[in-house]
Image (spheres, rainbow, N blue to C red):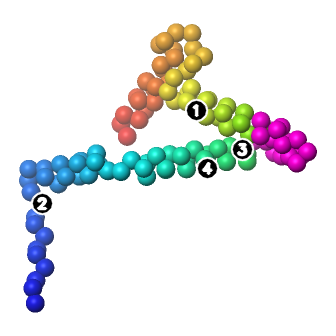
Amino acid sequence: MTEAPAEAPPRKDGHRWRSAGREIVSGNVLPGVLALVLAVLVGSLLIAVTDERVREASGYFFSRPGDALQAVWESVWGAYTALSRGAFYNTRADTFEVAIRPLTESLKFAGPL
């Protein structure tokens, strides 16, 4: 009967961090992309369900489905454009400094985290 090899103690030269970094960089991108797509879909569903105009238009969906679909599109598009405008780049700003301010504020508050 052979004994299982003992686990080697962690080395002091950062071998563990180097191998962890290599695994992260060389990993598969597909799970991250699928998670992002799923998050956008679930978020869109929640936005559409909670929007008052979508609920009103859904009441007569079978007689005029275009109204409901347009209401869904406008609510989801409006929410995600407002999110990006408030977090990254304000396309409605007059100057570049004002337009880039959401990104600098996001970085300022997220930096310590």
Query: Visible in this render: residue 43?
Result: yes
Q: Which amino acid, mark 1? A: Leu
- Left or right of 26? Residue 88 is right
Which residue is nearer to you in this view: 4 or 52? 4
Mark 1 or 4: in front is 4
Magenta residue span: 51-70
Q: Is residue 60 magenta?
A: yes
Which residue is nearer to you in this view: 64 or 16? 64
User: Residue under circle 4?
Assistant: 42
Give the structural element (helix, strand or loop) at label 2: loop
Decide which of tag 1 and tag 4 comes sooner along the chain. 4
- For the C terminus, the quadrant is top left
User: Residue under circle 2?
Assistant: 10
Crowd class of label 2 (few under 14; some 14 to 19; many from 20; radius 10 Å): few
Give the residue at x 8% y 50%.
Answer: 13
Q: Is residue 105 magenta?
A: no
User: Residue under circle 1?
Assistant: 83
**Proximity of marks 2 and 4: CB atoms separated by less than 8 Å:** no
| Measured Cα–Cα span from mark 3 to mark 2 | 51 Å
